[in-house]
Image (cartoon, helix red, strand yellow):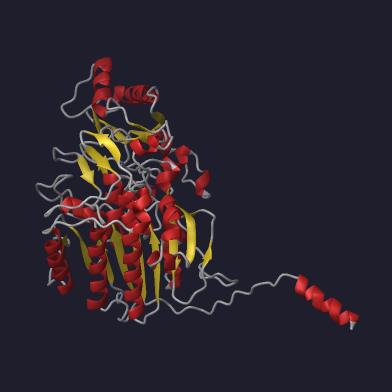
């Protein structure tokens, strides 16, 4: 009896070892990839406790809260290009939203990441959308090569989101064209009925004024931040009739994109064909809200509530198909709040960029110092940071000296953290994980393409907002090599599987091989930068 009691007591004192039972999941018939533009890991953490719909459901799947857009060029086009290619910008060639190609015969040497510059009359502002600048295949491209029965449908609020996630061989591709959803100009055949229906609905919605409705959880965040000249942010405002710009910077925009995606899912019967289909969805409103109002006001709070609802509607539509599916949600980049609110909250280092930190100012200094005059701009740039290009008219014997002088001048500016030359980056190997330990130069190396990157690449100091004046346009932006712009959540969800959370760092380039493994896609490791993430919570593995 004493022995039995002792054994029983020992059993009670010993913690139970949980055995996670994971039955093999069926091969997905549908892969859905959602990118929430400017959805930083900080935003996910801030609102995770408030999510009650689709985002809450995803947050109970396979959660990687420390995901990274590991490169320094944390802009929309580079970020979207990593998600379904497994390739960093150094491999994909998508180094920025815009860069300069000084060999172009047109006067405008700036190119847009999703344009076809060969179209007569095209420039970086009025362009024909094309995937030609993307050097690598997407998941959909690879799957269609292996199985022609695969269909790829891309829907987004931005053309670059649809292009970079959908790839080169999309069966249907629709993106916002300014006042309606449009497709590539080379697409023939009738559009799905869903497109006309959604466009008509949007036109009717924007034609009327919209009354702001503040969700209850957002009341504490409704605090005005004055910016001068009567402009303020932080308080949800009504939208005037025919305000398409205001429509983009509100949850209604994502709702329309979600409606379009759900409509195409049903009309095209995605996942119900012979192969596994791919649906990519780019939800862009969070980015427009962040640029227009910042990330910490009532506007962003209302957007997070709407995002939660829209993701829930997508999941409900997928459930209704009764098909095995997998969803991944991530972001193209993060972001940080506007300078004025940051300073109000006790961050004195937060400041706006010096207007004199511009290519034209430094070009004038170099021209005077070296006695060089050019027909075009001596220095080409798209802003006070990132890639700067020295004119091809600079004599070869002066080129290296001028680049060295420019680097020294830039480093002397108190808002500049570091400056790298193309030669600095060209001789470095591609960096390897863990990405949170990368040095600054490694982050820039991951975004460096010797064919497209500038002669000089500039990093501003943390908390320096590269927008000098918040009155004229955007109040905040992203694009830095710092954690607030690099860190994004990566969430996988498959119905019926056991969820878990992995706090160690992963990259968005890991998404392609992870999804590829679920459908048995053979992807040579030397062709990508990512690795497969195991989505099995137990001792099994979803990776080969």
Place of residue 230 in the rendered image (x, y in percent of width and height, measured from the top left): 21, 36
Horizontal relation, residue 410 to residue 505: left or right = left
Place of residue 449 in the rendered image (x, y in percent of width and height, measured from the top left): 35, 44
- The answer to whether one can see residue 231 in this image is yes
Quarter of the rendering containing residue 443: top left
Of the 4 image quadrants, the one containing the N terminus is bottom right
Place of residue 506 in the rendered image (x, y in percent of width and height, measured from the top left): 49, 55
Residue drawn at x 12%, y 71% is 189
Of 489 and 420, which appears nearest the observer?
Answer: 489
What is the tally of numbered marks visible in this picture? 0
Quarter of the rendering containing residue 285: bottom left
User: Quick check: 144 above or below 243?
Assistant: below
- The answer to whether one can see residue 139 in this image is no
Quarter of the rendering containing residue 474: top left
Of 217 and 140, which appears nearest the observer?
Answer: 217
Horizontal relation, residue 241 to residue 285: left or right = left
Of 360 and 352, which appears nearest the observer?
Answer: 352
Of 188 and 79, which appears nearest the observer?
Answer: 79
Which residue is situated farthest in the right direction here? Answer: 2
User: Quick check: 347 above or below 396?
Assistant: below
Residue drawn at x 33%, y 80% is 320
Place of residue 232 in the rendered image (x, y in percent of width and height, measured from the top left): 25, 40
């Amino acid at each position: 009896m004493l022995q039995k009691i002792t054994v029983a007591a020992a059993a009670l004192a010993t913690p139970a070892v949980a055995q996670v039972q994971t039955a093999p999941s069926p091969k997905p018939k549908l892969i859905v990839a959602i990118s929430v533009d400017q959805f930083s890991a900080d935003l996910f953490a801030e609102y995770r406790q408030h999510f009650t719909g689709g985002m809450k459901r995803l947050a109970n799947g396979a959660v990687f809260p420390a995901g990274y857009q590991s490169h320094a060029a944390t802009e929309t086009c580079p970020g979207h290009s990593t998600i379904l290619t497994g390739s960093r910008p150094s491999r994909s060639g998508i180094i920025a939203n815009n860069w300069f190609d000084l060999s172009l015969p047109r006067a405008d040497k700036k190119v847009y990441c999703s344009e076809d510059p060969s179209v007569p009359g095209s420039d970086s502002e009025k362009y024909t959308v094309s995937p030609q600048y993307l050097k690598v295949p997407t998941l959909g491209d690879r799957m269609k090569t292996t199985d022609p029965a695969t269909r790829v449908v891309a829907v987004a609020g931005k053309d670059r989101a649809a292009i970079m996630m959908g790839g080169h061989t999309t069966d249907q591709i629709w993106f916002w064209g300014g006042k309606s959803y449009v497709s590539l100009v080379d697409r023939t055949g009738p559009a799905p009925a869903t497109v006309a229906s959604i466009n008509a609905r949007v036109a009717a919605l924007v034609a009327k004024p919209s009354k702001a409705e503040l969700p209850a959880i957002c009341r504490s965040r409704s605090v005005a931040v004055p910016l001068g000249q009567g402009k303020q942010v932080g308080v949800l405002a009504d939208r005037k009739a025919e305000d398409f710009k205001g429509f983009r910077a509100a949850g209604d925009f994502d709702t329309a994109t979600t409606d379009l995606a759900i409509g195409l899912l049903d009309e095209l019967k995605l996942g119900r064909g012979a192969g596994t289909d791919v649906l990519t969805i780019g939800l862009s409103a969070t980015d427009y809200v962040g640029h227009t109002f910042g990330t910490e006001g009532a506007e962003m709070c209302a957007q997070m509530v709407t995002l939660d609802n829209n993701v829930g509607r997508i999941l409900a539509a997928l459930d209704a198909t009764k098909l095995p599916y997998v969803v991944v949600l991530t972001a193209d980049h993060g972001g940080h709040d506007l300078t004025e609110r940051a300073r109000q909250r006790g961050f004195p280092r937060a400041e706006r960029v010096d207007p004199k930190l511009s290519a034209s100012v430094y070009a004038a200094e170099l021209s005077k110092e070296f006695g060089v005059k050019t027909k075009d701009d001596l220095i080409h740039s798209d802003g006070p940071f990132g890639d700067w290009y020295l004119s091809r008219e600079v004599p070869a014997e002066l080129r290296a000296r001028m680049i060295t002088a420019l680097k020294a001048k830039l480093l002397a500016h108190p808002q500049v953290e570091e400056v790298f030359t193309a030669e600095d980056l060209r001789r470095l190997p591609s960096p390897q994980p863990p990405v949170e330990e990368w040095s600054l130069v490694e982050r820039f190396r991951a975004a460096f393409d010797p064919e497209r990157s500038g002669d000089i690449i500039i990093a501003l100091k943390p908390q320096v907002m590269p927008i000098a004046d918040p009155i004229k346009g955007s109040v905040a932006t992203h694009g830095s090599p710092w954690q607030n712009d690099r860190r994004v959540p990566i969430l996988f969800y498959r119905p019926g599987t056991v969820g878990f959370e992995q706090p160690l760092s992963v990259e968005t380039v890991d998404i392609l091989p992870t999804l590829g493994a679920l459908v048995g896609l053979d992807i040579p490791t030397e062709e990508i930068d990512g690795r497969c993430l195991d989505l099995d919570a137990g001792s099994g593995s979803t990776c080969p």
